[in-house]
Image (tube, helix red, strand yellow):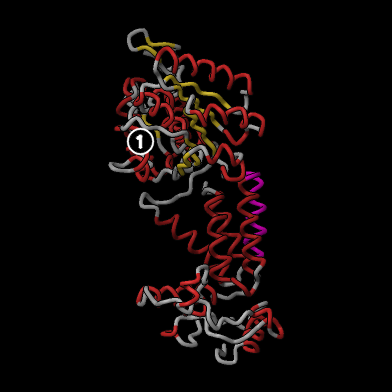
Amino acid sequence: MDLFDGTDRNHGPSSAVPLAERVRPHSLDVFVGQEHLLGEGKPLRILITGDQLPSMIFWGPPGSGKTTLARIIAHETKAEFFQRSAVSSGVKDVREVVDRAEYNRKYAQRRTILFIDEIHRFNKGQQDALLHSVEEGLITLIGATTENPSFEVISPLLSRCRLYVLRPLEERHLSTILDLALAGDAVLRALAVTVNDRDVLIRLCGGDARTLLNGLETAVRLAALSGQKPVAVGRQEFEEAFQQKAARYDKNGEEHYNIISAFIKSIRGSDPDAAVYWLARMLEGGEDPKFIARRLIVLASEDIGNADPYAITLAVSTFTAVDYVGMPEARIVLAQAATYLATAHKSNASYVAISAALADVRQHPDEPVPLHLRNAPTGMMAHLGYGAGYQYSHDYTGNFVEQRYLPEKFGDKVYYRPTENGRERDIRSRLNALWKSRPR
C-alpha cells in the first residue's frame, strides 16, 4: 500500500482519510481523557450507560474530544446522529433534523441526537429554533463550544441543557493517543513508523489531540517522500510539519518549568529586560501563549496585588487579547503585559493574608458566626438573638463604625497588612485611621 493512494483495495480507506479520523475511537472503553466525567462511577458515564441522556453542552478547548464524545454517545445509545456546524448551518437545517426526529419517535422508537459544533456561533434566532424540540425531548441536543456558554448561549437554551466542562488533555493522555495511533492505524503500521522525540510533538500540539495526529501525519509524509522506509520521525520532521521550533525541553519537562520560573521571578524582581528575554525564549520554543498569559494573571495578584490594582485587570485583558489574536501578534500583547507588571509596585500582602486565614480556618473549621452578623428572616431567629446589636455602617459618620466581624476566638487578629508600596500606602493609611483596634 502506498501512503498516498486514495484507497487501499485490501483494507478500505487509506491516507485519503485524515489520520485523526481514521483512529477516532468509537467506544467509551478506548476514549482517552476526561476521567472526571467518564471514569467508572462518574456522572456522564452513568447517564450514557444507563441510556438516560439529557441535552448537554460540552465546553472545552480544541482537540479535547468534544466531537468524538458526541459520536460515541450516539453509538452507545443506538441513536440516529446528525452533525451540523453552526458556521454553515441555519434554521432550515435544524428543522430538517427535527422532522426526522418526529419520524424516529413515532415510527422507529429511536432517539435522535443533534450535535452542533461551535454552537456559540448560532445567533439568537437559530438557538430559539431549538428550544421547543429540546424541551419536549424530541431531540437530544449536544452542543460543543470553546467559548464560555454563559456568555454565548441564550439562557433559555442553557437552562435546558446540562453543562459539562472538558479539560485540556494532559501529556499522559496525548502520549496514549499517540501509542494507540501507531498501533492501530494500518497506514502507519505499513510504513513501520517509529517516533523519536515524542516530547517535541506533544509540546508542539498545545494539548490538542487533533493537532497532535495531524502533525504526526504530516511528519510521516515528509519522511516517506524523502525515501525513508521504515519511516522514523523526530524533532526535525515535527518542526518542519508545524513550521515552528519546539522548545528544547527535556523529556521530563524540566526546562519548561525552569524557564517559566525564571520569567515569573524576573517580573517579581522588577527586571523588565530579563522578563522579555525569558518570554522570547518561551515563544520561540513553541510555548502556548495562553499558558504564559494565565501565569501573568496569577502573578498580578500574588506579587503586585493592591499596590497596583490595575495589574490584575491588565493581566486578564492580556489573556483575552492573546486568545482573540493568537500568534504571532500575541507576542506584542504579552511583552506589554510583562514589562508593565515588571515595573509595577509590588506587594504580596493579599497572598499572605489568604494563606494565614486558610491556616486558621483549617485549624478551627467550625467557628460560629457572631450573632449580630446573622440574618433573622424568621421571628424565631430574631427571638434567638440573630442580628441583635448589629450596627449599620451607613448610619454613622464616614459610613464606618468599629464592631466585631471576626469570630470571637480570633479577636482583633490582622491578616491583611498593606505595604507602603504604590496604592497600598493609601489603603494602609485608611485602615489605620478607621480601625484603632487593629493597627497595620
- Judge left or right: residue 105 versus residue 304: left
29 over 263 or under it: above or below: above
In terms of secondary structure, what is the magenta stretch mainly?
helix
Give the x, y percent position of residue 324: 64, 44
Q: What element carries label 1?
A: helix
Name the image quarter holding residue 341. Answer: bottom right
Which residue occupies 50% across, 41% down?
59
The C terminus lies in which quarter of the figure? bottom right
- Judge left or right: residue 297 versus residue 325: left
Residue lying farthest to the right in this orientation: 397
98 over 204 or under it: above or below: above
Give the x, y percent position of residue 252: 36, 52
123 over 265 or under it: above or below: above
The N terminus lies in which quarter of the figure? top left
Which residue occupies 49% across, 30% down?
141
- Judge left or right: residue 265 versus residue 187: right
Which residue occupies 64% across, 87% down?
434
Name the image quarter holding residue 257. Answer: bottom left
Residue lying farthest to the top in this orientation: 9
Number of residues whose C-alpha sits closer than 10 Å to that of mark 1, classed few (under 14), some (14–19) or many (20 or more): some
Q: Is residue 327 visible?
A: no
Between residues 165 and 16, which one lies in front from this camera angle? 165
Give the x, y percent position of residue 52: 37, 32
Give the x, y percent position of residue 437: 55, 91
Q: What stretch is highlighted in magenta?
A: 324-340
Is 189 covered by the magenta stretch?
no
Q: Is residue 80 visible?
A: yes
The mark total stands at 1
Mark 1 residue type: Leu
Q: From the image, tell me which residue sits under label 1.
A: 47
Is 339 covered by the magenta stretch?
yes
Residue lying farthest to the bottom in this orientation: 436
